[in-house]
Amino acid sequence: MQVSDRQFITGGEYIYYPAIIRDISKSRKSLQPIYEAFTNALESLDTVSAEKKITISIHKKTLLEDDDIEFSKIVLEDNGDGFNDDNFERFCRFKDTRKGFNNRGCGRIQYLHFFKETEFLSFYDSEGKYRKRNFILSKKETYLENNAIVYHIKTEDISESEQFARRTELSFNEPVNKKDFEFYNKLTAIQLKSLIIKQYMGYLCTHRNCLPIIEIIEFRDNEETEHLTIIADDIPAKDKKDSFEVNYIESLNSNSNIEYSNEAVEFSLTSYKIPKEKATGNEVFFTSKGELAQELNINFLSDSHHIEGYKYLFLLSSDYIDKLDSDTRGEFKIKTYDDFKKELPDLFDENNPKEIALEDIQENIGKSISVNYPEIQKKQEEQQEDINKLKKMFLLDDESLAKVKLTINDSEENILKKVYKYDADVIAKKDAEIKRQIDSLNSLDPNDEDYQEKLTEQIEELVTKIPIQNRTALTHYVARRKLVLDLFDRIISHEVKVKTNGEINESLLHNILFTQHSDSADESDLWVINEDFIYFNGYSDTPLSEIKIDGTKLLKESFTKEEERYLSSLGENRKIKRPDVLLFPKEGKCIILEFKKHDVNVAGHLNQINKYAYLILNFCDDQFQLNTFYGYLIGEAIEPRDVRAADSDFIEDYHFDYLVRPTKKVVGDNKNDGSLYMEVVKYSTLLKRAQLRNKIYIDKLTKNLKDDLGDCRE
């Protein structure tokens, strides 16, 4: 290629660089141009017989006005082939693949995206002569106006008297935007070394015993301040290597029935055990040409787990991945089952190349890890037990768990999110089908001869679509109730850790049933006592003077002199008495709940609810006319004979294990008397009743699930 000095290398008639730069997206990795140059440097070392070497230098300068440090440039140097005539010609020709399928020259576009100018200085030998070539890569306006990104400065022979050392130097000067400048401004040699090791773990691990010299140097005002070298001790030794094949997908229908081709793709899986203090996590990566490309999410250990002080790195390589790699290196896509389904029915025609599925790769990696590392398999089994606990606790069904492809990396929260999202998607789909089915009923003509037959057919189809909505919503509802009952059980069984002075405080149970100082009965768990209670307006642990019904205060705004005297007599302020729970089911009625400590003899507090009923009857606002009361005194230390000794009107119900007083007069001082119905019941009795009610739902959900669901799920 004959090129004059001081000349733009134009794209010619068939290449328009402004469009090319726009079409190839900027990498999300701030170091991508450095990675591109490093990869090229590694490739250029293949023919070097002497000591191979790559040096990356970070140059910073001191600002005189405030003594701050500012990024100047980053320089990468290697002693590879250099830009001889053939290499320079390939560099100037966009997407020249003669060097190899994946050497398409697109990496240089990343140089343009990140830096305003990249200068190349290359010393090389050519047919026994020593030469020097100097050129610049840029997308500055003057370049693009000439449909060029390369400006050739000079290529010249070096006289024999000059000392020759084969080397190529790339200087990345002035980042294009502020964000990139800030990144490089903060970049240190130590950080860069760590990032290079991580990015090239595949190459470095496979070349651990024959590494080129890789130096990372930091300069300040052209004076060296840090000098690091990547050595074998920085790189984990290979632990094991395995291989497996993944068959191409021949066909796939909408029901996910897969047929595989006899042809397969071969993969190599190389594993490394890394001391936990040096590892970022337990990871599996695709590699492309020795570089880390994309991370895979498989059924593997979480990042926080280590086994005997080691974490694990698995590197997956294949010619299939190398060929799939895109113009933006390391960015490619392997289709999932869902991707295949979306592209049906044209996906498998003769014009489309055969492909493999990501799930099949993941499955094979999981099998390989389990076989080669029994200790990981054991840890996975332990974590699977945790998933099973969630399954039991939240009534998750096996089909949902299987469909969402859970991984060991998933936290408990993510597991639930994935399952619930899957259920929501299924419900949305079925709701849409139900809507279409109902709409189609309008198209039926009663005058048609087969009207009844069509109507029956559509109704039957509609009915089969409804159960999944009912079941999913009910599952979440029942699972939450199960958690509440389990916690309630642990508290009254003395298994809960949170206690007060070594005893269970009734506030624990109070807050489970209806959060103290709250007025949202519909969000409470009073269903444990009675299913109807959550539908009433109510207050928990709130002074009588602050309670409102439909915006109006429960107690009167003004009292007679005698009423005021009574309300504050004996040093008490009866207006701020706080029943544990007050509920107002409908006009004229009031429910009063009182909770007692686990070990308090309830018989000594039988008159407490009577007093609340008296206060409300006599001092409530006249518009409410509250005169019918229902009281529930709840504790655990209940001796029926003590209760009846204190109030002989109580009757013991042996079948349902509680005591009831059907009616008691509530004295009205200046109004008609009211009545009070009252029960004395144990926490444990309420728990048994609630558990029995919830068990009916659970049995319905879990018994003959497939028969119940029919063909609702696809």
Image (tube, rainbow, N blue to C red):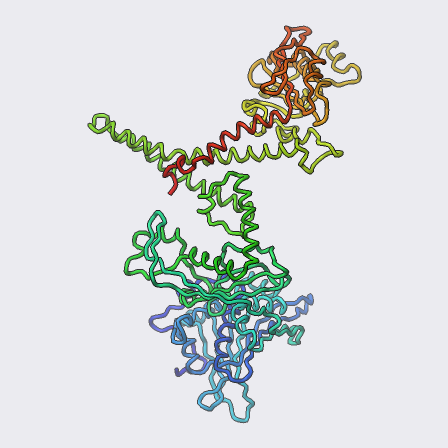
**Which residue is at the front of the view, 571 or 134?**
571
User: In which quarter of the view is residue 360 placed?
Assistant: bottom left
Q: Is residue 434 above or below residue 137?
A: above
Q: Residue at 56% of width from left, 79% of height from top?
A: 53
Quarter of the figure with residue 232: bottom right
Q: Looking at the image, is 77 positioned above or below residue 190?
A: below
Name which quarter of the figure residue 495 lies in: top right
Give x and y (percent) for residue 392. 53, 40
The quarter of the image holding the N terminus is bottom left
The percent position of residue 662, horizontal first and vertical second, equals: 61, 12
Q: Residue furthest right?
A: 571
Of residues 59 and 491, which is closer to you in this image? 491
- Give the camera-side residue of 57 and 322: 322
Which quadrant would the C terminus be assigned to in this image? top left
Q: Residue at x 21, y 29 (%)?
A: 450
Q: Is residue 6 visible?
A: yes
Residue 321 in the image: state x and y as whole percent: 43, 65
Q: Where does the image place residue 582, in percent across and percent down from the top left?
A: 63, 21
Viewer-nearest residue: 545 or 205: 205
